[in-house]
Image (cartoon, coloured by chain):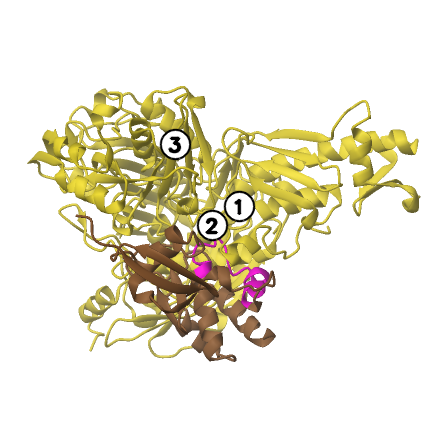
């Protein structure tokens, strides 16, 4: 039953880590249990809700669908790495001000999706914002305040 | 007012946007956790002949295996004691708990479940409420009538666990006096609350046998009681620590995996975590009651409603659960917010072979409005009356009541809310474009509240701490902070407020029923007012003045007229330590309160594509009677989110079953609205300070979902002439209806 562990080295939020892990472990599970970065959430485990979204080498991915071994040698950014040196990212400020988080469970994934958008497209239209977060389900806000927050953050940057 | 009424960000928002908030599955302990897994029944209805767990117990890495044998042989239930936590002789739903394991990792736990052998004798199952009422339907509880039941339970027979008939006026005379009588049947299927965070628990049983349970819950005191009941333990043997909660909407109030985790932790001697899979959550957590409705309404030619006869059948699932709460709510809301002299209501709650249903945002509200408000629309069209005018003609006013609402109602703003929505949506100036339509619906809700208590203390630096056991969902805690800050003349930043656990929090109401703010807000306001008195008492001695002459504002206290001379709150707090009264702190209670009405009126503009039946919501206007909005940012946010949830119920959401197994237990197949589906929601607040609420606040979270499916259904009819009587209003149903009316292509 027990399989041989694999050694991987990944950079997460600028820090490099080397770990021995079970080959079937998802990147989500690796982040949450091996690195104790619990900001990234699990909502479905099937890549349908986006709560586990992280940025991997400049691409938005659902970390529940990626094996940790696939992340070997890659650079990952999670919600914990969005603010730097105690300074919030404009997206985080805008989410707070616009009331774009209610329960807050989708928020980490939502912020990663938004950050990925702004990284590639610093001045998006509303429609581009709606498309960028289409894979991130939110059950509390109805999305309007989230779109407002992302557009406000884009102006801010 | 300086703090109340301000649009302030949530007090805990920075933790949420940085990923620091600790939700259910984020709790970590010093000792390693075992993974718990539940073995659910594959059959909707079957007798258990044998359970063999020996192989699973021997698997290396398995630390505990439990079945019904590990629980006291008692049934539990708040209204009817019909529930067994683990199935003993019979399973009554797909996913009914048969056994559970705790193992060192997920793989081992899953392997152990596969090694448990259960022999079943499969029985015929019944899923639909109306079918379950038939004489020849399979009996889900053979001895239902012998179970212990609370005094209000009546009419038990076969699968019917509750039947109540209520009569008001003279229903037969009412129909005789009517010029026209309309009768329609409607159906609203089971839907799921679909919070993004699944049910999760971490349980530890310490050496003294005391259980600590970390859970995302809306009702920590309910869950504590339920766990104690299931184990037959003294209440205080259970400590519930509520974590941040990733959405609830009513779905996180009843026990699901918590008792299993406690039993596994007890048996293994190690902490156990259970995280439900999305499929398990869909199939077995407590979704919304499906509801069959029959509405028969008699009207005069001028639109005056003279009689309404209503029959409602709620499928409660395998157990009663809190089905009777839903039933009582339904009775209060069934007629809609209209003056109707003659009313007859028949209400049935029926056992069915699916998950035990539970509360979901405005329990029974959207279902009943879907029936009632569509029929009002039909009547308006048949009588050639404007739908807004027909509602204005019949809507209740100050001092009116509706059946079972418990007497004359105060703060009734149905008509003003109707006018506000109609005006905002330019109702009278409806554009006439092909395949586009506009619909309106009037939502009625009654907010009652349970007893609550809350504490407030002044810290040595002049800041304030608020002690509460209420769990925050969409801003209640921030609003409580605003209320306390307002009373004590400080800023929201000076108020520290977080949820305490069941051992230490003063008894708090549930975070549900739109009552958190009113119940808790009242208690917190009373406590803050008492603290203010104590501040004045301590300061009066120092300032050599009468306490009554002191003003507490701007983080200071001073004698009226000599603003420059006073004391800071920090100085007062320090003085209190040597003052004869001691530290400044107060815990106050708010008693339970009776029903307060709230109204929401929605206007939906839709476009229907006749070739495909697809509906697009073009514009959505929501007006709501909110009393005083303590935090308009939160109030509008809750209403917007609620509408989008309601649009899911209207257009795309339904749990689909085959032989009792849910066919669509994934986000892919159970379609909640995404950013691409959701229209912008325009919110208009109708603000009149209401009696009893803190600073005049009313409950907000539930009224806002009530009229959504009805407003959309009415808009679809307006657009293409297709009248749909079953939710959701899917493209397929619209297309079929268009083909029937000959309008489809």
Residue B646, given in percent of the width and then of the height, sits at: 39, 57
Contact between marks 2 and 1 (CB within 8 A): the answer is yes
Give the chain ID for the brown colour. A
Q: Is residue B571 left or right of residue B445?
A: right
Residue at 40% across / 23% down in the picture?
B207
- Please name whichever residue, B345 or B678, is drawn nearer the observer in this view of the structure: B678
- Please name whichever residue, A55 or B129, is drawn nearer the observer in this view of the structure: A55
Q: Badge 3: few (under 14), some or many (20 or more) residues near its Cα, within 10 Å?
A: many
Distance in Å between CA atoms under marks 1 and 3: 36 Å
Element carrying mark 3: strand
Q: Which mark is residue B204?
A: 3
Contact between marks 1 and 3 (CB within 8 A): the answer is no
Query: Pointer 2: what residue?
Result: B703
Name above or below for residue B483 compared with residue B619. above
Of marks 2 and 3, which one's residue comes earlier in the chain?
A: 3
The colour of chain B is yellow
Q: Which mark is residue B699?
A: 1
Name above or below for residue B452 compared with residue B703. above
Q: Badge 2: few (under 14), some or many (20 or more) residues near its Cα, within 10 Å?
A: many
Tell me which segment is drawn in magenta: A91-108
Residue B635, given in percent of the width and then of the height, sits at: 55, 54
């Amino acid at each position: 039953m027990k399989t041989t562990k694999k050694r991987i080295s990944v950079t997460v939020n600028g820090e490099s880590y080397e770990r021995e892990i079970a080959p079937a472990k998802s990147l989500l599970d690796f982040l949450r249990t091996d690195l104790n970065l619990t900001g990234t959430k699990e909502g479905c485990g099937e890549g349908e809700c986006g709560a586990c979204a992280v940025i991997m080498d400049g691409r938005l991915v659902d970390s529940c669908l990626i094996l940790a071994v696939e992340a070997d040698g890659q650079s990952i950014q999670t919600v914990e790495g969005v603010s730097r040196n105690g300074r919030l990212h404009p997206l985080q400020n805008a989410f707070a001000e616009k009331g774009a988080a209610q329960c807050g469970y989708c928020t980490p994934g939502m912020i990663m999706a938004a950050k990925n958008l702004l990284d590639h497209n610093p001045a998006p239209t509303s429609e581009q914002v709606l498309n960028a977060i289409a894979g991130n389900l939110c059950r509390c806000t109805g999305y309007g305040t989230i779109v407002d927050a992302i557009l406000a953050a884009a102006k801010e940057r | 007012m300086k703090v109340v009424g301000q649009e302030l960000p949530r007090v805990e928002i920075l933790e949420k946007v940085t990923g620091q908030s600790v939700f259910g599955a984020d709790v970590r302990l010093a000792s390693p956790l075992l993974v718990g897994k539940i073995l659910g029944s594959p059959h909707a209805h079957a007798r258990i002949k044998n359970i063999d767990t020996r192989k699973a117990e021997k698997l290396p890495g398995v630390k505990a295996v439990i079945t019904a044998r590990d629980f006291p042989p008692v049934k539990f239930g708040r209204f009817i004691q019909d529930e067994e936590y683990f199935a003993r002789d019979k399973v009554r739903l797909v996913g009914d708990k048969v056994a559970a394991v705790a193992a060192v990792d997920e793989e081992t736990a899953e392997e152990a479940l596969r090694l448990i052998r259960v022999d079943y004798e499969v029985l015929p199952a019944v899923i639909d409420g109306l079918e379950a009422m038939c004489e020849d339907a399979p009996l889900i509880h053979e001895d239902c009538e012998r179970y212990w039941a609370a005094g209000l339970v009546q009419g038990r027979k076969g699968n019917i666990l509750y039947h109540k008939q209520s009569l008001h006026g003279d229903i037969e005379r009412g129909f005789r006096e009517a010029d026209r009588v309309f009768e329609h049947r409607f159906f609203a299927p089971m839907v799921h609350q679909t919070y993004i965070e699944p049910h999760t628990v971490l349980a530890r049983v310490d050496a003294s046998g005391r259980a600590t349970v970390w859970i995302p819950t809306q009702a920590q005191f309910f869950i504590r009681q339920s766990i104690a009941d299931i184990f037959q333990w003294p209440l205080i043997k259970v400590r519930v620590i509520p974590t941040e909660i990733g959405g609830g909407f009513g779905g996180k109030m009843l026990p699901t995996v918590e008792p299993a985790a406690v039993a596994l932790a007890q048996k293994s001697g190690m902490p156990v975590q259970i995280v439900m899979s999305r499929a398990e959550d869909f199939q077995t957590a407590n979704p919304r009651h499906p509801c069959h409705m029959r509405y028969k309404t008699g009207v005069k030619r001028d639109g005056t409603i003279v009689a309404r006869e209503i029959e409602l059948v709620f499928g409660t699932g395998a157990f009663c659960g809190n089905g009777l709460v839903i039933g009582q709510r339904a009775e209060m809301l069934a007629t809609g917010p209209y003056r109707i002299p003659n009313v007859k209501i028949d209400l049935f709650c029926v056992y069915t072979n699916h998950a035990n249903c539970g509360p979901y945002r405005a329990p029974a509200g959207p279902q009943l409005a879907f029936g009632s408000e569509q029929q009002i629309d039909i009547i308006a069209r048949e009588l050639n009356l404007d739908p807004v005018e027909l509602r204005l003609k019949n809507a209740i006013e100050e001092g009116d009541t509706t059946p079972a609402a418990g007497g004359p109602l105060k703060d009734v703003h149905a008509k003003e809310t109707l006018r506000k929505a109609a005006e905002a949506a330019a109702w009278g100036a409806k554009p006439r474009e092909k395949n586009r339509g506009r619909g309106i619906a009037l939502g009625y809700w009654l907010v009652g509240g349970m007893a609550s208590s809350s504490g407030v203390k002044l810290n040595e630096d002049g800041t304030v701490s608020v002690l509460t056991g209420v769990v925050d969902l969409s801003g209640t805690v921030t609003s409580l902070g605003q209320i306390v800050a307002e009373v004590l003349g400080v800023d929201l930043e000076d108020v520290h407020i977080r949820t305490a656990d069941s051992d230490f929090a003063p008894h708090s109401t549930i975070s549900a029923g739109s009552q958190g703010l009113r119940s808790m807000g009242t208690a917190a306001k009373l406590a803050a007012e008492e603290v203010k008195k104590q501040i004045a008492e301590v300061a009066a001695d120092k300032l050599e003045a009468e306490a009554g002459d002191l003003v507490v504002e701007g983080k200071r206290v001073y004698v009226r007229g000599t603003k420059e001379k006073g004391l800071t709150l920090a100085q007062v707090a320090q003085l209190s330590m040597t003052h004869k009264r001691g530290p400044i702190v107060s815990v106050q209670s708010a008693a339970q309160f009776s029903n307060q009405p709230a109204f929401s009126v929605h206007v939906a503009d839709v476009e229907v594509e006749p070739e495909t039946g697809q509906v697009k919501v073009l514009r959505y206007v929501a007006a709501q009677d909110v009393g005083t909005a303590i935090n308009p940012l939160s109030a509008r946010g809750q209403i917007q989110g609620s509408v989008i949830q309601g649009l899911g119920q209207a257009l795309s959401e339904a749990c689909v079953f085959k032989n009792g197994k849910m066919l669509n237990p994934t986000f892919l197949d159970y379609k909640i609205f995404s950013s691409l589906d959701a229209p912008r929601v325009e919110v208009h607040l109708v603000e009149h300070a209401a009696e009893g609420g803190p600073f005049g606040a009313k409950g907000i979270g539930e009224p806002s979902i009530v009229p959504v499916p009805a407003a959309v259904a009415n808009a679809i009819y307006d657009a293409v002439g297709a009248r749909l009587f079953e939710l959701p209003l899917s493209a397929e149903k619209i297309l079929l209806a268009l083909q029937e009316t000959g309008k489809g292509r």
